[in-house]
Each structure stands twice: as C-alpha cells, then as structure tokens.
Image: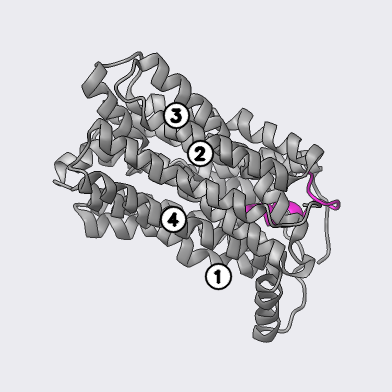
Amino acid sequence: MTIRPARSPATIVAVVCVAEILGMTPFSMFLALQPVLQSEWQLSNTTSGWISSAYYAGYMVAVPVLASLTDRFDARTVWLTAITFAAGGALGFSSMANGPVSAVLCQALAGAGLAGTYMPGLKLMGDRIATALHPRQVAFYTTSFSLGSSGSYFLVGQLVQDLPWRTAIAVAAFGPFVAWLLVYLMLSRVEPQSLGAAGVSNERWRDVLRSPDTMRYVAAYACHMWELFGMRAWLIPFLVFCITIHGPTFAAPTTLAAMLALAGIPGSFAGAELSARFGPRRVVMAIMLASATLGMMVGLLTSQTWWLILTVSLIHHAFVMGDSAALTSGLVAVSPAQSRGTAMALYSMTGFGAASIASFAIGAVLDALGGQSPLSWSVAFFAMVATNVLGAALLARGRNTA
C-alpha cells in the first residue's frame, strides 16, 4: 500500500477520533430511552434486552465482511460507506420503529454502521501513519468510543426533555452525516494493495485462526465486551431502579450514565500507558480481575446510599475501559502483519457477539428472578463480570512478550 502522508499523524488521529465520536451520536437511541419505550411498548426485560442486543448483533454480522475488506481496499471507502448505515438506522428508528421487530431491524442497521467504522477506523489511521501505531494513539482512539457513547447518552437524554423521542433521535442522526463530511474532506485516499481474491482472503483467516496468541486476545476481548455492553445495556434501568429506592439524585439517569461512561477515558489512557511499560498481557489480566471485583460490589450496593453506589460505579467504569486499549494493542502486537485487518474483524465480531448475548442474557436474569429487585440486580452484576475471570485465565497462558 502506498502511504501518502498528506496530514500529520496528530491530525490524522484527531480527525478519525472526532469522526468516530460524531458517528456515534445515535448509539444510545434505544438505551437512553429504554425505560420510556419499555413502558410505551409494554416490553419485558428479556424483550428489551433483545432490542439492545440487536445493535451488537448487527455489528457482529457485518464486521467480518467490512473490517476484513480493509486488507483489500482503502479503509476510507469502507468507513464512508458504513457511516451511512448508522445514519439510516437512526432515521429509520425515529420514523418507523413502533415495537420490537421494527426496533430490532433499525438497531441492527445502526450496529452494522459501527462495524464498518470502529475497527476500520483503526486501520484508517494505521494506513496513513508511516510508523506503527503507538499504544497512546490507540488509547486516544478507544477513548473516542467512550466519548461517543457518553455523548450520545447525554445528547439524547437532553433532547428528549424538550422534544418527542422520535424527533430527538432524528436530530441525533445528523452526527453521522457530519462525520462523513469530515473524513471525506480531511483524509485523502491511499492506493490499495493489488491482491488476488478469495484464496488470499481465506489464507488470511487461516493465519489468524492458527495464531494461539491472537486467539487468546480475541477470546479475552469477548469477555471484556460481555461485561462492558451488558453493563451499558442495563445501566439506565439500574439507575432508574436505584431512584425507586433512594429517590432522585443530582442528575437524570441519562446524565448520570454519560458521567459514568466518561470515567472510562482516564481508565483507558492509564491502561495504555501501563501496557506500553509492562506489556499488555499482564496489564489486561490485572485490570480484568479488579473490574470483576468492583462490578460485584456495585451489584451488592443497591440498598446503600447514592454516594456509595455512584462512587463505586465510577471506579468500576474506569476499570472496565482500562483494558480496552491494552487489549487492542496486544492484538496488534501478536497478530500476523499481513492479516491484521482480518484479525481485527474476528476480534470485533467475537467481541460484539458476546455483547449481543450479554444484553438479552442480563434481561433474562432479571425476569427469571421476578423482575427488578436488589437480589436480581446483584445476580445480574455477577453475571456481567464473571467472564473477566475467564479472560484473565486465558491470557495467563500467553507469551510474556505481549
């Protein structure tokens, strides 16, 4: 691939990060409105979980195609195409969603949009920066995900206070259009590699599947994503439940969710710096075990005071995102160089597949225990974080060098 560094590395990273944040404005279109729509559409917790999981299922189905295409075509082309899916899913949700089936379809389309922008965005940067991506650059990028998700919670939550929920989501859908313009205007095309077709593609998949260290990071990422998105899917209902026990606190649930998500930013940077110093494997293992402990504590605190619930939740969110950049840096370090885009595709597909299952599994746990109660939320949080122990155990068998 011919690199044409029309922009400085700092500019390239900034453009892709800002575009990712703008592209995620519709991210919480169901999550932020879940208590409202659960009541309006008469949804059980399990059905509500299915709608949440459809976003990640759309990602899971689309990412092996979209991310692996970046090994053959300019990642910019893939990115620009996919961001239109995110806009289309949001506009469809705002105009047509009237129950579980239509909501699932729109969520899946929006999730496919994220599939073609998140991991391909990393490739978009890497293809335009002559040197290997530094863990700090990866941390900036993974942090953009936290900013995008927290910004979406806050934006939709604020808009819905003054506008009908359909109008609020339609407004949020403009973010992906602005992101499209930013990438189109600021980043030039690069010449794709000349590759032979399916046989080469199949060889890349074999390279990835035969790399034990790559597969350990893929599995560990799935464990991480189970916790992260199981929690994000049910964070606002959890906060609403706490309000029923303790009464309102200083901010609305959507604002609280945005604030908690922002805690992932320093956590992600800290994890990246520690990863650069001590190696991603050890750092990820330590963070996963700490996050599992903190998540269990949150589940046990529903009958305690607001300040204790929010303080432990804030620390937990920082640890949840603390291993994100380290995991991605570790994958990049151990995956075969010629198949890195394919490795990212499998990494994302497996991770968001776990996220999809977690979203409805937590809803099923709540329903199985009779709805929302201190006991059901304690068990739900245990279910969210237990996979971290498995992820740490898998990485313990990897090489010390990555």
Q: Residues within 10 Å of mark 3 (few under 14, many from 20)?
A: many
The N terminus lies in quadrant: bottom right
Q: Along the horizontal axis of the image, is 215 left or right of 48?
A: right
According to the picture, the residue beneath numbered tag 4 turns out to be 111
Q: Amino acid at mark 3?
A: Ala
Residue shown at 55%/68% (left/top)?
A: 64
Q: Please state the extent of the stretch shown in magenta in the rendering.
A: 121-134
Q: Amino acid at mark 2?
A: Ala
According to the picture, the residue beneath numbered tag 2 turns out to be 292
Instruction: Give the label, 3 or 2, closer to the camera.
Output: 2
* CA gap, disc 2 and disc 1: 32 Å
According to the picture, the residue beneath numbered tag 3 turns out to be 258
Instruction: Give the label, 2 or 4, closer to the camera.
Output: 2
Q: Along the horizontal axis of the image, is 266 left or right of 166?
A: right
Q: Amino acid at mark 4?
A: Gly
According to the picture, the residue beneath numbered tag 1 turns out to be 65
